[in-house]
């Protein structure tokens, strides 16, 4: 058996608490003399139990000593015979009493106390570790959300910097509405809704590119994600862009009376 396995058997804890049989204690003490690692392990266990005992110790109240002494009677009883100083005391044979050693009982109590403290310490550490893991998981989740937002902002900035910005303003019947189309050399169209209400239930907004006087669909959207740049269709050329409100799924041709915004390139 190697040293680490020997230490992990729990024999050192039993030895420190006085619960190890005499024969096993003798063997351990012999091993300790010749093995620095075992000797160091015994020292560590002793320090651990001392710390556990100190952490659970309670200081006696300051008034306890005076209360105990006040209850003690130090007067000499009347029937007690006092031997004068000039007389020799009577020699009384001393019979030694055999006192039964209570080492095992004390060891058991100490072992139980140390076990309770150890279990309490392990329970506290387990509770603390669970809370720490929960906090780490929450921080990790928050960090992932933040990283996603940062990535999206970087993508949006790249699109804005490398594309032509076409401002789509509200028509006479819908003043104040505003959207932006970003159209770059890749001919990919991106749309950002700045001020448009969400489409009513059963309807969607549809982006149109005006190509040589004819409307070409560039895709549908709900308008429920303001300030987010949305990817639309690829348009090779266009003289203007417009947005209409259509039935859900879009329309083959724009409903002109439902036009919301428009802007030229």
Image (tube, rainbow, N blue to C red):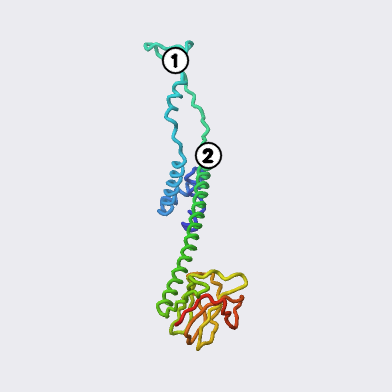
Which residue is tagged 2? 109
Q: Residue furthest right?
A: 202
Q: Which label was assigned to residue 13?
A: none
Residue closer to the observer: 72 or 87: 72
- Name the residue beneath numbered marker 1: 75
Q: Are marks 2 and 1 in contact (CB under 8 Å)?
A: no
Relative image position of residue 20 (x, y in whole percent):
51, 45
**Image point 50% across, 27% down: which residue?**
97
In the rendered image, the vertical position of residue 167 relative to residue 116, given as above or below: below
Question: If the image is split into quadrants, where does the C terminus sit?
Answer: bottom left
Q: Specify whether residue 228 is in view.
A: no
- Tell me which residue sits at (43%, 26%) in the image: 65
Q: Residues within 10 Å of mark 2 (few under 14, many from 20)?
A: some
Q: Quadrant of residue 86?
A: top left
List x then y, in percent, for residue 43. Answer: 42, 48
Frontmost residue, 237 versus 230? 237
Percent across and percent down for residue 8 are 50, 54
Q: Is residue 11 above or below residue 56?
A: below
Residue 213 percent location from the top left of the image? 51, 87
């Amino acid at each position: 058996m190697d040293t680490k396995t020997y230490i992990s058997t729990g024999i050192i804890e039993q030895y420190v608490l006085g619960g190890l049989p005499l024969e096993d204690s003798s063997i351990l003490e012999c091993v300790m003399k010749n093995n620095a690692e075992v000797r160091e392990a015994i020292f560590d266990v002793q320090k651990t139990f001392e710390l556990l005992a100190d952490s659970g110790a309670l200081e006696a109240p300051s008034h306890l000593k005076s209360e105990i002494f006040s209850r003690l009677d130090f007067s000499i009883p009347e029937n007690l015979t006092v031997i004068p100083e000039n007389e020799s005391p009577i020699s009384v044979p001393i019979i030694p009493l055999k006192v039964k050693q209570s080492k095992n009982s004390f060891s058991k109590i100490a072992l139980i106390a140390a076990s309770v403290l150890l279990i309490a310490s392990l329970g506290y550490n387990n509770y603390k570790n669970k809370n720490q893991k929960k906090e780490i998981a929450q921080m990790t989740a928050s960090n992932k959300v933040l990283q996603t937002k940062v990535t999206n902002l970087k993508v949006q900035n790249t699109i804005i910097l490398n594309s032509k910005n076409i401002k789509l303003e509200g028509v006479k019947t819908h003043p104040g509405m505003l959207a932006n189309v970003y159209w770059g050399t890749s001919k990919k169209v991106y749309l950002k809704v700045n001020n448009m209400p969400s489409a009513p239930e059963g309807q969607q907004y549809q982006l149109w590119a005006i190509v040589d006087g004819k409307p070409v669909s560039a895709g549908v959207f709900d308008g429920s994600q303001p300030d987010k740049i949305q990817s639309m269709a690829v348009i090779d050329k266009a003289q203007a862009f417009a947005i209409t409100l259509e039935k859900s799924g879009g329309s083959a041709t724009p409903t002109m009376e439902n036009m919301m915004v428009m802007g030229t390139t």
